[in-house]
Image (cartoon, rainbow, N blue to C red):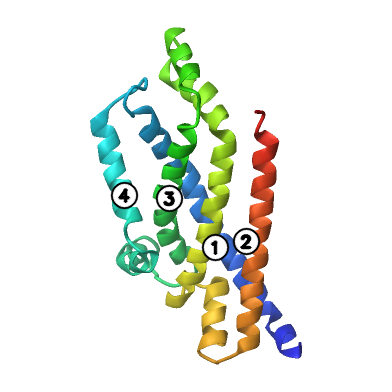
Amino acid sequence: MDHIIKLLPELNVAFFETLIMVGIALLFAIFIGLPLGVILFITDRGLFLENKYVKQAVGIIINLIRSVPFIILLVFLLPVTSLLLGTTIGPMAASVSLSVAAIPFYARIVESAAREIDKGVIEAAVAAGASPWMIIKHIVLPEAKPGLITGLTITAISLIGYSAMAGTIGGGGIGDLAIRYGYYRYDDTVMFTTVILLIVIVQLVQYFGDFIAKTVDKK
């Protein structure tokens, strides 16, 4: 117990580093992944902005990024991270790779959530002369809101796992603490503590994500 108390400052730092990494990646997922997911949906066959070339181009880029295992993506993006931030270690540096991984992941979830919308509602809006932006703003996004929130929850939980992996290359966070103490120093107490902490974080994220999704679901 005394050992854990002595490590509390480092645990606190690692916890907030994980929150920073996941938070930044989630912001990029929302501001870039969400629009990309909407583009994938509205350019699909039979929809109001059907365009197979745009859909294929965006789909190929997303699939290329998603096909790369995250640990390889981490290493592959090190030169880009160094160019952007001047360093390849720390939570901010790890956020670059996490963001790149989060964007296509969430984009596909957004597309899937939008597909659950009743096509008749969209067709009625098109027939009434609604503009594409109005359809997206007043039909697509509101109708898909529960799925979007659930998808964001899934993305956040995945990013927590990825952030732990980022600790293997000096990304900081709980994963870094687990590697330094639990693996290199054979400290089972620290390893057990970090695992419990990760489980608690994931459970809290899942609970609040489900709660918000149920709250906004008016079906």
Q: Position of residue 124 (x, y in %)?
A: 47, 12
Q: Is residue 187 above or below residue 80?
A: below
The reply, left or right, for residue 84 in relation to residue 154 is left
Q: Quadrant of the N terminus?
A: bottom right
Viewer-proximal residue among 50 and 179: 50
Q: Residues within 10 Å of mark 2 (few under 14, many from 20)?
A: some
Q: Are marks 4 and 3 in contact (CB under 8 Å)?
A: no
Seen in the image, is 173 located left or right of residue 74? right
* Pointer 2 with pointer 4, Cβ within 8 A: no
Mark 2–mark 4 Cα distance, whole angstroms, equals: 26 Å
Kind of residue at badge 3:
Phe
Are the residues tagged 2 and 1 within 8 Å (C-beta)? yes
Residue drawn 26% across the image and 38% down it: 56
Q: Is residue 21 visible?
A: no
Which mark is drawn over residue 202? 2
* Percent of width and height locating residue 30: 50, 44
Residue occupied by mark 3: 105
Seen in the picture, residue 20 relative to 63 is either above or below; the reply is: below
**Which residue is disc 4 drawn over?**
63
Mark nearer the N terminus (2 vs 1): 1
Label 2 vs 4, first from the N-terminus: 4
Q: Amino acid at mark 4?
A: Asn
Q: Pick whichever, 26 or 9, lies toward us.
A: 26
